[in-house]
Amino acid sequence: MHVARALTELQEHDLAILRLEKELEEMPEKRAILTIRAKIAEIENLRERTQAAIHAMDVVSKRIEDQIAVLGVKMSGEQDKLVSGTIASPKELQAVSMELDALRRRVTVLETELMTEMQKRENGDAQLAKIDAALANGRATEASLTQRFKEHGSDVLEHIESEKRARAALIASLDADVRARYESIRESRHGIAVGSLQGSMCSACRVTLPAGKVSALESGPDVGVCPSCGRILIVRSE
Ligand SMILES: [Zn+2]
């Protein structure tokens, strides 16, 4: 193949690769995945806090239950005294009876507190169920986005691979020094190593060249150098 044509095509493949890589980088699924992952992390955080709150409620409930149990033991002790028939004086009988009433009142207060805690615990469980549903929902969305990302992404990757194969074939057809020049300019000039002379303008840097330089290029070889940007300049490709 004519070197000017090979260089032009090489440039086209490299631009296609850049464009496809950018497309891969900016795939909408990628951003959506990042967004849903952040949301999942937030929900997981909320779940942890809710579980900690539920655990704290359980600790409080357990403490109240223990207090009720202790009072129960005391009450049955007082009741044993009453039925044992060992209490002789009415005064002592009254004292035991008052103590029993006092214990009963304390138990009632604690039982009300326990009911409140249990109600809070139920609300906490309901909250946790909602969080779990939201979490499952978020994870399902993430999975389907990941699937779409893979499908879309693998199409783009395949396209990149075929461009790279075409590029490799062209590169192999070039002389080593042309190849080296192309690669080094491509790297230093944001991926564009080749321009073509369009009238008196370089298509790569869009600079209109002085008439003298243009005529010097036109009377030279097919492939020259742009005096403005230093890229390879295709003067004529046929
Ligand atoms: Zn130029």
Image: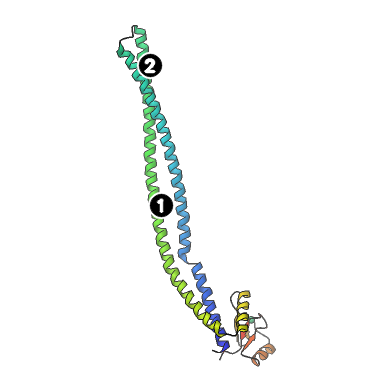
Determine which quarter of the picture holds residue 85.
top left
Please tell me whether residue 91 is drawn above or below residue 27 in the rendered image: above
Quadrant position of the N terminus in the picture: bottom right
What amino acid is found at the position of numbered circle 1 in the picture? Leu
Q: Mark 2: which secondary structure?
A: helix
Q: Could you tell me if residue 79 is visible in this image?
A: yes
Marks 1/2: CA distance? 53 Å
Q: Could you tell me if residue 206 is visible in this image?
A: no
Quadrant position of the C terminus in the picture: bottom right
User: Which quarter of the rendered image does ligand 1 occupy?
Assistant: bottom right
Return the residue found at the far right.
Answer: 212
The residue where tag 2 is placed is 99
Return the residue found at the far top.
Answer: 89
Determine which quarter of the picture holds residue 211.
bottom right
Q: Mark 1: which secondary structure?
A: helix
Residue 20 location, x and y as percent?
50, 73
Quick check: is the Cβ at mark 2 less than 8 Å away from ligand 1? no
- Which residue does the image show at 37% across and 42% down from the upper left? 125
- Which residue does the image show at 50% across and 81% down from the upper left? 166
- Which residue does the image show at 37% across and 12% down from the upper left? 95
